[in-house]
Image (cartoon, rainbow, N blue to C red):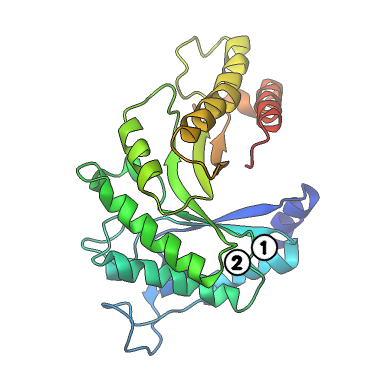
């Protein structure tokens, strides 16, 4: 937990953005696992109020100490606004949108939030709560999108989060519905893990390196062209998560791993992707 050393790493590689994953909103509503509520009788349900202490510290480090901008992923709805705890649907989509709008308004009053990124829900199509009714995610997304754009129209809002659409197209219909019904979309997020869709021999180093082209170049081209069929506003493609070695093989820490990673970065750069 050497914060100063980690900050220096980010400075050395000249990060433009650093991702903050707000998991269950614990960074906002809880401190050290215990509720810390502020007095606000207008706050919905049992959350009672905001405590930004921890998240303020993260934002301050990113903006003021490192000189980057935040990429904030709101992983799900807070327990106190949800039906059954972490990852479940908010009881009221409109009020959930207002909460995220208020969070961003808090930071808009402190910083220039132009070109900050907000991703709505983490990997919603891996969550069973959206399988029976994909419109639930679209409704949540639109509430959040519109509330945040009221705070600052220059904050980038997106989501959905794709995972190897070209090779595993089971949620293609849900993606089409989202693209058609979303009120606005600044970006679509991709999570790439190096061996997704790889059917070869994991001992074949050349095959694994060649596979990075399919993941980080062919796949992103495929997704870009797919989205253009349904959206005229040209949303960005953002790599929100990546791991070149999806098997967590020991080779990724050796010389071969450096070549593998360099290959992936090469295709990311050629595709002009933000990651």
Looking at the image, residue 182 lies above or below residue 211: below
- The residue carrying mark 2 is 58
Q: Dot 1, crowdedness within 10 Å: few (<14), some or many (≥20)?
A: many
Specify whether 61 is left or right of 245.
Answer: right
Q: Residue 46 in the image: state x and y as whole percent.
A: 27, 78
Specify whether 92 is left or right of 61.
Answer: left
Helix, strand or loop at label 1? It is helix
Marks 2/1: CA–CA distance: 6 Å
Please name whichever residue, 232 or 17, is drawn nearer the observer in this view of the structure.
232
Residue 249 visible, this orientation:
no
**Quadrant where the image shows the N terminus:** bottom right
Q: Residue 261 in the image: state x and y as whole percent.
A: 66, 28
2 and 1 marks in contact (CB < 8 Å): yes
Helix, strand or loop at label 2? It is helix
Q: Residue 132 in the image: state x and y as whole percent.
A: 19, 43
Determine which quarter of the picture holds residue 79: bottom left
Please name whichever residue, 40 or 249, is drawn nearer the observer in this view of the structure.
40
Determine which quarter of the picture holds residue 207: top right
Residue extending furthest right? 12
Q: Dot 2, crowdedness within 10 Å: few (<14), some or many (≥20)?
A: some
Marking on residue 79: none
Please name whichever residue, 178 or 95, is drawn nearer the observer in this view of the structure.
178
User: Residue at the spot x=39%, y=50% of the render?
Assistant: 182
User: Residue at the spot x=50%, y=65% of the render?
Assistant: 149
- The residue carrying mark 1 is 62
User: Residue at the spot x=38%, y=57% of the render?
Assistant: 142
Q: Residue 77 in the image: state x and y as whole percent.
A: 34, 62
Looking at the image, residue 130 lies above or below residue 193: below
User: Residue at the spot x=73%, y=69% of the render?
Assistant: 64
Residue 212 visible, this orientation:
yes
């Amino acid at each position: 937990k050497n914060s100063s050393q980690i900050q220096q790493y980010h400075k050395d590689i000249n990060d433009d953005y650093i991702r903050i994953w707000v998991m269950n909103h614990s960074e906002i509503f809880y401190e050290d696992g215990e509720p810390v509520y502020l007095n606000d009788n207008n706050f919905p349900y049992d959350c009672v109020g905001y405590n930004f202490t921890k998240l303020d510290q993260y934002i301050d480090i990113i903006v003021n100490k490192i000189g980057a901008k935040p990429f904030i992923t709101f992983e799900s709805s807070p327990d106190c606004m949800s039906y059954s705890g972490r990852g479940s649907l908010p009881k009221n989509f409109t009020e959930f949108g207002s909460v995220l709008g208020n969070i961003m308004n808090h930071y808009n009053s402190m910083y220039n939030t132009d070109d900050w990124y907000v991703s709505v829900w983490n990997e919603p199509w891996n969550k069973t709560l959206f399988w029976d009714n994909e419109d639930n995610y679209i409704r949540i997304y639109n509430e959040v999108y519109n509330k945040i754009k009221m705070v600052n129209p220059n904050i980038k809002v997106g989501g959905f989060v794709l995972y190897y659409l070209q090779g595993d197209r089971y949620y293609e219909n849900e993606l089409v519905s989202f693209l058609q019904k979303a009120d606005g979309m600044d970006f679509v997020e991709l999570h790439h893990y190096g061996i997704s869709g790889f059917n070869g021999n994991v001992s074949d180093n050349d095959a694994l390196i060649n596979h990075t082209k399919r993941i980080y170049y062919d796949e992103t081209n495929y997704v870009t062209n797919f989205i253009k069929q349904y959206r005229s506003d040209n949303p960005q493609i953002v790599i929100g998560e990546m791991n070149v070695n999806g098997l967590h093989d020991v080779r990724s820490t050796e010389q071969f791993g450096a070549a593998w990673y360099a290959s992936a970065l090469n295709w990311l750069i050629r595709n002009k992707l933000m990651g």
